[in-house]
Each structure stands twice: as C-alpha cells, then as structure tokens.
Amino acid sequence: MAQGSDVKIRTEYRDPADLGGGPDGRSARRDRNRLAVIDAAVELFSEGNLRPTATEIARRCGLSPKSVSRYFEDIDSLITAAAARQMETVFSLFQIHAIGEGALERRIDDFVQMRLKAHEVMGSTSRAATFLAFKQPSVRKHLDEAQGLGRKQIGLQFAAELRPLPPPGGSRGPRSSTPCCSSNPSTISGSSGGSPSA
C-alpha cells in the first residue's frame, strides 16, 4: 500500500482480462472495487473517522468519489456492508466450542476471550454503526439483531446459572422465556455460539 502524505492510498488493480470490456470483466471489476471501498471504510473507521466522506474513501482505495457513490448510495448502506464483510471474514472468532458445557470458571474464560477477540476485530465498525444508529433505522435494526444473538449466546453459555433466577418483575421459575435466555436451536447450536455484537 503506497503512502501519500499522512493518508494511505491504495492503487486500484486492474486485471488485463477486465480491460477487454466484456460483461464478465466488468462484473468482476465492479465486485473487486466494491470490496475495496468497504475495506477502505473499515480502515477509516478503525482510525476514528466514523463518518468518512466519499472523497476520503476514494482517496484511500484509489477510486473516484463518483465510483464510491455509485457502489453505495449513503453511509448507512456502506456501514451495513462493512459489518457484513467483517462478519464473513472473522465468523470463526465468534464461536464458542461446546457452548454451555464445563465448569463455570472455564465458561466465563471462554466467553470473555471470545468477546475480547470480537471487539478487537469488529470494534471500529461497531462504533461507527452505533454512531449512526440513532438516525438510521436500518443500521439500528442490524445492531438490534446482532445484540439479540449476543444475548442468546449468553443464555446458552450460562443457562445453568441463569435458569433458577426469577424473571424480571415475576416469581421464581425458569427464565427460558426471557430475552436473555431464550434461544432458537436452529439459530445457535449447542456446539457453537451465535454471532454476537462486538
């Protein structure tokens, strides 16, 4: 990655096969450039720029601002794509082996280590999403879904400890119907955790 002043600039790579102008070449170039835009946005998020402009993203990935705007209509759609891109890349980090099994001390350690790794990888994108969630309903929706999976993961990992507790405002009894402990086995299996919010 070349250096220009204090800004890293990525030069767009053009495959010779793409320059022929055929449909397949154009599609491949579009997909590659779209990923370059997402990766550039993630880099800027990690540097504390939670609302980068099209010009800043274009400079980082070696495209024109017009191209950036063509791939993503607004920062909302870009952040959503960036979060999805990171989840695809690091999904294995969000898994807990043999979830809910073993001694409490080990389960706590496994859970904390998983969350620390998740925060290290996804923290910057999560901060950007949280920043926009107040104004962007679609971003808020994705955050709520991720946090819901995180709560389900907590419920599965610590079911033995949480089950005897009384539900909020109710009498003692199983808490399987509460948001924290309710789980859908088809969503989060007993052998691995779901994908929590970072």
Image (cartoon, helix red, strand yellow):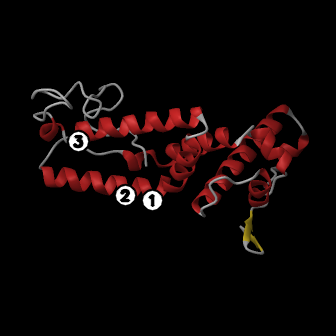
Is 52 placed left or right of 110 in the picture?
right
* Mark identifier at residue 157: 3
Is 61 placed left or right of 131 in the picture?
right
Among the 4 quarters of the image, the one containing residue 6:
bottom right
- SS label for mark 3: helix
Q: Residues within 10 Å of mark 2 (few under 14, many from 20)?
A: some
Position of residue 158 relative to residue 117, above or below, is above
Dot 3 amino acid type: Gln
Give the image location of residue 42, x and y in percent. Answer: 61, 54
Dot 2 amino acid type: Leu
- SS label for mark 1: helix
- Report how many numbered discs are placed on residues in the image: 3
Is 99 placed left or right of 138 in the picture?
left
Please identify the residue farthest to the front as the structure is shown.
Answer: 169
The reply to whether the C-beta atoms of the residues labelled 3 and 2 are less than 8 Å apart is no
Position of residue 87 relative to residue 165, above or below, is below
Foreground residue among 87 and 97 = 87
Foreground residue among 173 and 40 = 173
* Mark identifier at residue 102: none
The reply to whether the C-beta atoms of the residues labelled 2 and 1 are less than 8 Å apart is yes
Q: Residue at x 43, y 55 (%)?
A: 119
Among the 4 quarters of the image, the one containing residue 159:
top left
* Mark identifier at residue 120: 1
Give the image location of residue 88, x and y in percent. Answer: 52, 43
Q: Residue at x 13, y 32 (%)?
A: 166
Position of residue 173 relative to residue 72, above or below, is above
- SS label for mark 2: helix
- Label 3 vs 2, first from the N-terminus: 2
* Mark identifier at residue 116: 2
